[in-house]
Image (cartoon, grey):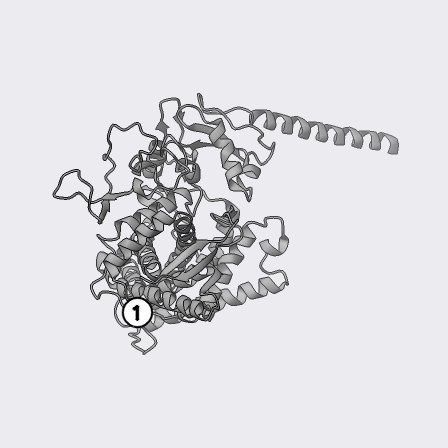
Amino acid sequence: NCHKMLTHFMEVIALVIGTVLVWAWWIKRRKRFSPFKGIPCAPDAHWLLGHIPHLALRNFEEGLKTLVDTANPNGRSCFWIGNEAAISVIHGRDAHMFLSVTSDRNLDPLFKRHYKRILGLNSPILINGKDWKLYRSAIHRAFSPQALKECQSSMNLISLRLQSSLIQRINSSPDGTVTMDVLPLVRMATMDFFGSIGMGIDFRCCENLTNSPVAYAFEFLSDETTRRIMSPFNIFCQFYSLPSYLNRRNNQEQFSLREFIRSLIKGRRNGDNSPSMKKGSDLLSNIIAAVDKLHGNEQHQQMKETLIEETASDLLMTLVFAGYDTTSITLAYALYLISAHPQVQELCVEEAISALGTDEKTIPADFNPEGKLHYIRAVLYETLRLFPSAPSTSRLLNRPIKLSDCELPADTKVFVPIWCIQRNPSNFPRPLEFLPERWARRKKINGNDDFGSHEWEERPEDDTCENSNDDYISPANREAFVAFSAGARNCVGKKLAIQESVTLLAILLRNLKFNTVPGYVPNPVRAGPIQKPERGMPMIIQQRHN
């Protein structure tokens, strides 16, 4: 009997193993083909994970290259996310269309789990549907033209502080130069911007070139969340309750930060006018006012207060974390590209001096980059084209879409590889060259085509001419520029990010010269949902004597 039972048991085991092997073979074979007629499938799919191992590579360019190389003449390819088929697009027209037709997203569960913990349940980054529209609308109202105008004086002050602190470091150096990683510097400036503009708090990071406790908590949580997303098989990264130093530190910093923001919200709602608060309007006040309207019909007063505090806190955390790394990384790349192209740096300096004057301690009282500094703005756009902070994004179709080569059913995931789209020669000729002139041109004199002015203006997309010279620079393809995404879920803080970035670049370049460190080349690597230079951004800085 024992022998028969053992034989029967072995037969069952063999049957199970055989079934699993056949199932795995069938799954792997299935992933060699595309379910979308006319759209080729990327090769080398894992039998269980699909193409996730390729797309999760730290060297994200290598993974994205697979999709580009597989694409058909229409720039479309198919790949697998686990057992779910998805489509990738490379042509700017397709990218803009898919980003515009739907705002829904189906985020990676790992990403969603970690960011829900830090950003809260009401974060517009993590939700879809009606709730997303309500909270997105609340944030959008906070970025009114008047609010952006009132931000300018804070931007000027913070930029001057950073410039002054760097000049002090340079003057104390024996050779009149300093070699510094500019990424932490622009992160301090970005945090000061958010502190003053977003919360009415002066962190003074740029004044001391050190982070305040609140700024340090933001930076720690941002870096720590990225580390956990990039370490899916480390149980101490995935389970916050396990005993470890970083888990305790994470919980402590998150609690302290949330309590700090809640105290700000309570104080603002109670009319706090203490000296530590910046006078006037800030984004937090605007967010509270907008959220108050959303929950104004709530009958239970205590529940209403709790809803307003939680929602406003989540929205503010979302704004800071969405803009903190993206803005600072863009500024670091911009300074690198400017320093690597001396002729571009001189044009930036010329424009900055024209708008600001030469005195390192003052700025014209009426200075506002809106409608000015077109060349520096072009430098920023070209930086975002070459080095978008987020190398990719995605959408989930909420209805069928008919394409020229196939029809995509509802619930199809569409992958938009921003990095590849903006470096594709079909979208941007001479794609790997840094050419701000795609976005700006010398202003016309007396309305004719004699471009002899020293001033710059935005270059229209239809500014083309019949020119076959190799040096000809085509105007930028706006439809293929999706660094800020597009459609209803585009970057709500785009105008603020551009305004503060252009201001900081103009003030720094007016009196400081940035040079590349010999032999240094930035190596972009994936850091969660964004990319950043692997070894920071070291630069040689010296004072410019105008």
Residue 50 visible to an observer of this rendering: yes
- Within 10 Å of the Cα at label 1, are there few (<14), some (14-19), or many (20+) other Cα atoms? few
Which residue is pictured at 58% across the width and 36% down the height?
49
User: Which quadrant of the structure image shows residue 199?
Assistant: bottom left
Give coordinates of residue 512: x percent, y percent: 37, 60
Left/right of residue 18 with respect to residue 376 in the rendered view: right
Q: Which residue is mark 1?
A: 361
Which residue is pictured at 44% across the width and 32% down the height?
88
Left/right of residue 87 with respect to residue 373 in the rendered view: right
Observer-nearest residue: 96 or 448? 448
Residue 1 visible to an observer of this rendering: no
The residue lying furthest to the left in this view is 446
Rendered view: 301 above or below 439: below
User: What is the secondary structure assignment of the residue under circle 1?
Assistant: loop
Give coordinates of residue 8: x percent, y percent: 80, 29
The residue lying furthest to the bottom in this view is 275
Left/right of residue 263 with respect to residue 31 in the rendered view: left
Which residue is pictured at 28% across the width and 54% down the height?
350
Quadrant of the frame with the C terminus? bottom left
Give coordinates of residue 70: x percent, y percent: 49, 27
Quadrant of the frame with the N terminus? top right
Observer-nearest residue: 521 or 131? 521
